[in-house]
Amino acid sequence: MLNTLTDSPRQIALGDRVTFDTDEGYQVGTVNDLRRDVGNGELHAWVELDHQWAGMFRAVPLAAISPALS
């Protein structure tokens, strides 16, 4: 479980269901991995997207993630 570097710490763990805003609208998925960006070192969650082909992932900065809406 990791804390983001914001005023109110958020905890993200592998297996969490999360939502995030993109150019295509809000998307929902499951956190599969946490990796640092090669360029700037920012931590990203690798999210397996719902309603996509199996194995489709998106790298999402932790600051852009909110808990999944049930």
Image (tube, rainbow, N blue to C red):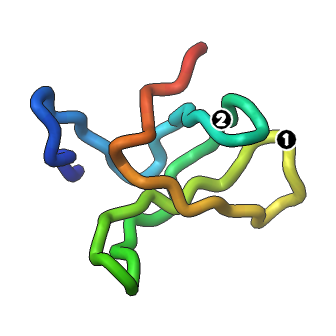
Q: Position of residue 48 (x, y in %)?
A: 65, 55
Q: Return the mark for residue 2.
A: none
- The extreme left residue here reads 7
Label 2: which residue?
28
Label 1: which residue?
51
**Left or right side of 63 for 50:** right
Tell me how far mark 2 sits from mark 1, CA to CA.
9 Å
Q: Position of residue 38 (x, y in %)?
A: 39, 85
Give the residue displayed 85% in from the left and 41% down from the top.
51
- The extreme bottom residue here reads 38
Give the residue displayed 68% in from the left and 35% down from the top.
27
How crowded is the residue under tag 2: few (<14 C-alpha within 10 Å), some, or many (20+)?
Answer: many
- Is residue 37 positioned above or below 55 on the image? below
- The extreme top residue here reads 70
Q: Are marks 2 and 1 in contact (CB under 8 Å)?
A: yes
Going by the numbered disc 2, the residue's amino acid type is Val
Q: Position of residue 14 (x, y in %)?
A: 41, 53
Give the residue displayed 32% in from the left and 44% down from the top.
12
**Left or right side of 8 for 47:** right
As rendered, which of 30 and 22 lies closer to the eye? Answer: 22
- Tag 1, which secondary structure? loop
Going by the numbered disc 1, the residue's amino acid type is His
